[in-house]
């Protein structure tokens, strides 16, 4: 009878040990990276708006052309380039979130076997009682720790400076409050014949910009630029920039000229010779995107009158 009691006790203790060993250990926390839109595309256009549902959507221009880029949410890699090839290949890194859960499971083991043999009446009652009650009670705690790691996002700059172009390293000056400048493209056209033109023809395009707001002081760069269609060129390079005669650069598909400040009501003009593509596109037209302050460095009262799309008919 005593042997049976010992067997029951040992079996109960073994069962409790097996249950204890089968408890899982808390798992370590995991981290995740979020991605955000680059503040500018490779052409220097600033971000207008963005959204992120099933993908990361970044718009850099709404009118006259809708230029945008799409990225995968989980990797940040470029998914679709609708920005004339000027989408950054990878989205900017946003916040890195680290979750460090502390999970301590509750184990409660109570083993109270009781064996009470009943002998004959003339035998004193033997009631051995073995009541091991190991109790391990812990309150599970899951407290994720959010650690925000700010990440500096470099701003891409697409401003090549040729050897014969003066570099203006002064800090652009704008008016943070109160009256501001307002740069407006008042004219953009093809000089001479309105077309249509043949493939490979050379034309002269012109744009004039006026400051209708407060004066932009000297030392502040006012940039005018042309983005030429694919396959177009500037005959003679800088020699093909007819006006102004200095402060310009040709880095296809872009041509730009820099001016030093601009007074109230003052106008500046940029004239460029352009050799049209050797092939006529399917739509029968090519376009030249004309901009003033393309990198949006000057705070203006109206930022939506700085772009004009010049359409050139082909035949």
Image (cartoon, rainbow, N blue to C red):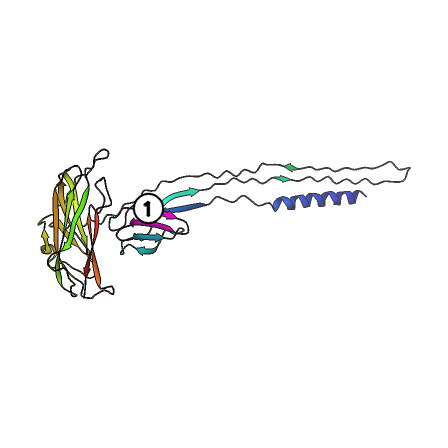
The residue depicted at 18 percent of the width and 59 percent of the height is 312
Which quadrant of the rendered structure holds the N terminus? Answer: top right
- Residue range in magenta is 40-60
Image vertical order of residue 306 relative to residue 279, above or below: above
Residue occupying image coordinates x 67% and y 43%: 16
What residue would you read off at disc 1? 49
Q: Which residue occupies the foreground of this view, 126 or 213?
A: 213
Residue 36 visible in image: no
**133 in relation to 315, above or below:** above
Which of the two residues, 207 or 89, is positioned nearer the viewer here?
207
CA neighbours of label 1 inside 10 A, class few (<14), some (14 to 19), many (20+): some
Spot the residue most to the top: 178
Report the quarter where the C terminus lies.
bottom left
- Residue 281's image quarter? bottom left
Q: Position of residue 261 (x, y in %)?
A: 14, 40
Q: Position of residue 217 (x, y in %)?
A: 14, 37
Magenta includes 120? no
- Which residue shows up at 36% across the image and 44% down it? 94
Residue at 21%, 51% in the rendered image: 308
Residue 120 position (above or below residue 280): above
Tell me if residue 202 can be seen: yes
Which element type, helix, strand or loop, lies under badge 1? strand
Q: Is residue 122 left or right of residue 100?
A: right
């Amino acid at each position: 009878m005593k042997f049976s009691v010992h067997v029951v006790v040992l079996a109960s203790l073994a069962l409790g040990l097996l249950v204890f060993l089968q408890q899982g250990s808390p798992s370590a926390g995991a981290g995740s990276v979020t991605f955000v839109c680059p503040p500018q595309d490779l052409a220097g256009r600033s971000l207008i708006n963005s959204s992120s549902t099933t993908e990361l959507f970044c718009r850099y221009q709404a009118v006259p052309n809708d230029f945008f880029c799409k990225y995968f949410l989980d990797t940040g890699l470029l998914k679709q380039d609708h920005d004339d090839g000027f989408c950054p290949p990878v989205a900017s890194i946003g916040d890195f979130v680290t979750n460090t859960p502390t999970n301590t499971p509750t184990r409660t083991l109570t083993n109270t076997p009781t064996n009470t043999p009943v002998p004959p009446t003339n035998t004193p009652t033997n009631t051995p009682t073995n009541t091991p009650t190991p109790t391990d009670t812990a309150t599970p705690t899951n407290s994720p720790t959010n650690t925000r790691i700010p990440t500096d996002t470099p701003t891409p700059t697409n401003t090549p400076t040729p050897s014969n172009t003066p570099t203006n390293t002064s800090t652009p000056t704008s008016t943070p409050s109160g009256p501001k400048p307002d740069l407006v493209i008042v004219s953009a056209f093809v000089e001479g014949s309105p077309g249509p033109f043949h493939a490979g023809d050379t034309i002269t395009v012109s744009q004039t910009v006026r400051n209708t707001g407060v004066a932009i002081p000297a030392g502040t760069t006012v940039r005018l630029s042309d983005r030429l269609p694919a396959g177009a060129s500037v005959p003679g390079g800088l020699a093909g920039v007819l006006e102004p005669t200095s402060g310009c650069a040709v880095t296809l598909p872009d041509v730009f000229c820099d001016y030093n400040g601009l007074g109230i009501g003052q106008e500046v003009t940029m004239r460029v010779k352009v050799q049209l593509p050797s092939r006529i596109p399917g739509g029968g037209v090519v376009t030249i995107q004309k901009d003033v302050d393309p990198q949006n460095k000057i705070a203006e009262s109206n930022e939506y009158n700085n772009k004009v799309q010049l359409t050139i008919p082909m035949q």
